[in-house]
Image: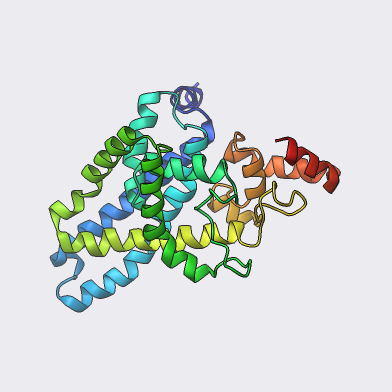
Amino acid sequence: MDTEEPRAARSALLSHPDDIHCVVYHLVTVAAYCLAFWLWLHPEASGLQGFWPCAAFTLAAAPLLGWIGGIDVGVNFHNHTHRRIFTSPSWNRWFARLWTPTGGWPAAYWRHLHVTVHHAHLLEPRDWTVPATLADGRFESSLRYQLRHWPWRTCRHFYLEIRSGRFQRHRAAVELAWFLAIWSIPFWIDPLMAVCLWVLPHWCANCVTLGRGMYVQHAGCEGHRDNPAHPHSNNFVLPFYNRTMFNIGYHAEHHDHPEVHWSELPDLHHRLAAKPPVPPSEAAATARSA
């Protein structure tokens, strides 16, 4: 009886029981930022007194915070964009607004980028989220993509999305205002701390964690409309990787079946692998009819 009551309460709050991992991971990410801020603001306890100790702490903490912050948005919040984790719409809306600032993003903007642009136009000309194709037909290098995509290309394309009406202006303004109100809090406390332990980790999150992850997931691939016989996504099926990354390694299955819960992707992968492959001619006909 004692074990059933917490489980029932959790299922009443969460859309899927396994989404408790999403909530816990985000709270751990917030706690990590808070610990870093506390150590910075209490040099008498942490020993961060003077330029060199603070510089060393920044160089150690920023990549780590960026690593977990990039996963928190690019993988963890990513799951929420496809299947809301709470049963309450208001919980989903407000938790999302408090979720993505740890990675330097307004929630609605990241959802638009990922669902409306990337998933809806996977590797098509309108999919500006993936590595660019150079004049000779090759994908740009990973380093070039990572350094140019965030925030430079991202800001430019969001401007175009809003101007064209593909991203509704009022919603863009409201969500950006909420984001700035939350994201600016560390600057009210200590501007230098905010640059070192907030802005720099966000650069690491987006250029290193998310940028590299996005690159390896789709570099060398083609959209199904261009070549149905060629993969549109790269899979990474190592068990340890997927257990620590919310099964994002099953990326082809995720794109083909985005409605499937992240916890069910390994089973889906094994079921699909057991089926005979679809002949290229049939795949091409299916892509043309879509």
Is residue 93 toward the left or the right of residue 227 in the image?
A: left
**Number of numbered discs present?**
0
Q: Position of residue 69 (x, y in %)?
A: 39, 54
Q: Is residue 63 above or below residue 118?
A: below
The residue under the point 64% across, 38% down is 264
Which quadrant would residue 36 be assigned to in this image?
bottom left
Q: Position of residue 172 (x, y in %)?
A: 33, 38
Is residue 178 toward the left or the right of residue 113 in the image?
A: left
Q: Position of residue 151 (x, y in %)?
A: 36, 58
Is residue 224 toward the left or the right of residue 203 in the image?
A: right
Q: In this view, does 219 lie above or below 123?
A: below
Q: Can residue 5 be seen in this view?
A: yes
The residue under the point 37% across, 54% down is 156
Q: Where is residue 16 in the image (x, y as percent from the top left)?
A: 53, 30
Q: Nearer the viewer, residue 29 or 192?
A: 192
Q: Is residue 226 above or below residue 195?
A: above
Q: Can residue 65 be seen in this view?
A: no
Q: Is residue 78 above or below residue 45?
A: above
Q: Which colour scheme is used?
A: rainbow
Which quadrant would residue 281 be assigned to in this image?
top right
Q: Which of 238 and 129 is in front in this view?
A: 129
Q: Indicate the quadrant containing the C terminus: top left, top right, bottom left or bottom right.
A: top right
The residue under the point 42% across, 67% down is 147
